[in-house]
Amino acid sequence: MPSQPNSRNTGWLLCSVLLVLQLSACQPAPKEFSDRVAAFGTLITLRYYGVAEADAAGATRHLEAYFRSIESDWYPWGDGELQRINEALAAGRAIQVSKPLADLIRRAADIEQRSAGLFNPALGALSELWGFNDLLQENWQPPERAAIEALLQQDPGSRHLQWTGFTLRSNNRSIVLDPGGITKGAILATADRILGELGIGNAIVDIGGDLLVRGNAGQRAARIGIRSPGSDSAIGWLAATPGEAIVTSGNYERYFEHDGIRYNHVLDPRTGYPVADSASVTVAHTDPVLADAAATALLVAGPHGFDALCAALGVDQALLITASGDLRLTPALQSRVHWLDDADARRAGDHDVSQ
Ligand code: ADP
Ligand code: MG
């Protein structure tokens, strides 16, 4: 059978995982404006509550200008700053890095260390080997095991990065920086700051399903639906706390298929192969950057490493759905989720969580 790239997903950021459920039973519908911006290869939805239409439009313009300002610079396989940084690292050259990108790379390195390498933002060469830098390619095949092993032998990792102020270099030529597992979180954090500066108190920024909730959705908290992996139906929902990011990483949006097997874009740095045990992870945290990185790292950790990694990262609200549909939840999140009726069978796995 010929290989098929997943044509629904050609961008560098994943598509929707969470639904914003606009459940308004018993309450008057809040005045709401929605805008959509295409950026980072995905759709960004901006929802404003109780904001004058002109102010909402102005906020969207500011946010779009911000998205455009980093769109090519933060993408490893484009023609912007990160591509030039990777070129310099591959050549063993030192290079000056802008503050926003330096902050992003340092933060990702910190989470790499705290996750004992399960989150690894220096593994761009492995993504290239698997072809995730070019999802449109035809006749895709998985790479040879020997090529994967040879790359891992070179030990690509952020601990080999050397900073002198904002100048970066490394002796490890196998490093290709790919902060894709953390960029949406960083973008959400900056979008939150911009909206605050503009005096917008109630809004939701939704980058392909990764959300930042400012304030409330009108008279009440925004209710965020949690999707059943790979489907459009929600298995439950939770009321967002103002200022909270709710982020999901899934294995079903960006993948290749070969001989009936799906190979998804989140890679386990221990093996060099795509994550197989986990279907999706949702994390809620007031720090969007940590939420984004943790969702990716927990997907890699899988159900067995879930509790230990939540503790190591300081994440107390997380949900993992395994490939077979069982759930792992932290107690703090479990107490917040309102399960929807048709999810009863999946809830059978709940008791695994509070060990
Ligand atoms: P999404 O971007 O769909 O929300 P993630 O936040 O999980 O999904 O990020 C996935 C991206 O993270 C991949 O496309 C790749 O760029 C990068 N990545 C893949 N595996 C890892 C890993 N083990 N650690 C850190 N980043 C990873
Ligand atoms: Mg992530």
Image (tube, rainbow, N blue to C red):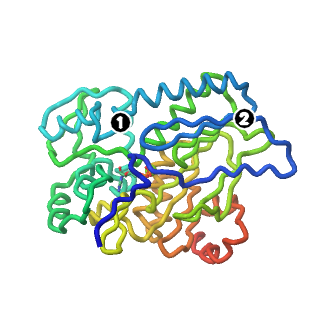
Residue pictured at 42% horizontal, 52% vertical? 9
- Front residue of 309/23: it is 23
Label 1 is placed on what type of residue? Trp
When the figure is inspected, residue 235 is found, relative to residue 23, above or below; the finding is below
Is the residue 79 above or below the residue 245 in the image? above
Q: Which residue is mark 1?
A: 74
Q: Position of residue 178 (x, y in %)?
A: 31, 45
Which residue occupies the foreground of this view, 189 or 145?
Answer: 145
In the visual, does 133 lie left or right of 276? left
Q: Dividing the picture into quarters, in which one does residue 330 lie?
A: bottom right
Residue appearing at x 68%, y 48% in the figure: 240
Q: Position of residue 319 (x, y in %)?
A: 56, 62
Element type at mark 1? loop
What residue is at 33 percent from the left and 56 percent from the top?
117
- Spatial CA span between label 2 and label 1: 30 Å
Q: Earlier in the sequence, mark 2 or mark 1?
A: 2
